[in-house]
Amino acid sequence: MAEQRVALVTGANRGIGLEIARQLSRAGFVLVLGSRDLEKGRQAAARLADHGSAPHVVTLDVTDSQSIEAAVSEVLRTFGHIDVLVNNAAILHEGFSPEDSSVLDVSSELVDLTFRTNTLGPLLLMQAVLPAMKARGYGRIVNVSSRAGQLEGMGAGFPAYRISKVALNALTRITAGELGPGNIKVNAMCPGWVRTDMGGPNATRSVEEAAQTVVWLATLPEDGPTGGFFKDKKQIPW
């Protein structure tokens, strides 16, 4: 019997992250839910357990390098490998109009906090999991990005968030380029405007729709793409 793949999903206690975990579990993965609040992570795991899953939960604050190191070490100790990393955890602390989030007014503190969560966290996590992936010769890394970080058509508003996602896209390209061709794939994806706490109730897409491309990228075959930006399983411009 084939060994089950192990997937670590950050920010998995709610929203898109929880749905990604649910869909990966249905696809046969052993799931590890990363949650900054351990109790909320356990509550999320219990909801998945009601549907037949039994995910593991780790405390994971992506802004804390020691938390990242401890979480990855725990997963490797428990399961021996990490096959998939989904960098989903992110924040958006800006208003939903250019007037509420001008680049002329945004504070350096907000830019720093957003960058540490949305970009530096994924970098540190990739640095933590890639040695084990390289040793096994297999890995899939999916960075949950945004159209807000797409240079094509870049506009006003959300400067801290946009900067962090542009940098995440660059990080995706750099990492994929350094790894080169092979069976470790690093890609970014745009979930669209999703009905979550971040996206709000008026968003046009469900979490189920948003998670599908992540699962597709997490299960790419050996000849699948790397270093790309995708939405709805189709490549889009950077």
Image: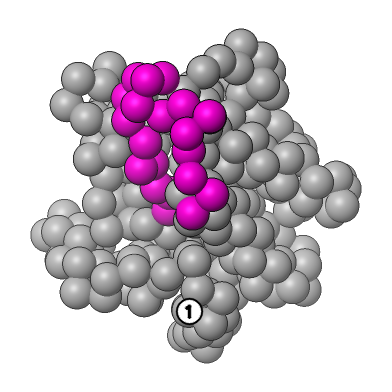
> Foreground residue, 137 or 4?
137
Q: Which residues are drawn in magenta?
A: 85-109
| Residue 233, picture quadrant | top right
Q: Quadrant of the C terminus?
A: top right
Left or right: where 238 falls relative to 53: right
x and y, in percent, of residue 209 in the image: 34, 27
The vertical placement of 27 against 235, above or below, is: below
Q: Is residue 79 visible?
A: no
Secondary structure found at label 1: helix
User: x, y percentage for residue 142?
Assistant: 57, 46
Percent across and percent down for residue 182 are 83, 50
Mark 1: amino acid: Ser
Q: Residue at x 42, y 53 (%)?
A: 89
User: Is residue 232 shown above or below 65?
Assistant: above
Looking at the image, residue 12 sits to the left or right of residue 174; the answer is: left
Residue for point 26% across, 75% down: 38
Is residue 59 at least partly visible in the picture? yes
Q: Which residue is mark 1?
A: 67
Q: Given the current orientation, which residue lies at the most extreme top position?
A: 153
Residue 93 occupies quadrant: top left
Q: Residues within 10 Å of mark 1 (few under 14, many from 20)?
A: some
Q: Residue furthest bottom?
A: 77
Instruction: Return the x and y of residue 48 as percentages of the image width and height.
Output: 20, 58
Residue drawn at (46%, 49%), measured in percent from left and top? 110
Check if residue 100 falls in the magenta segment: yes
Q: Is residue 203 above or below residue 210?
A: above
Per the picture, the main secondary structure of the magenta-coloured stretch is loop
State the count of labels. 1
Where, by quadrant of the figure, is residue 154 drawn? Answer: top right
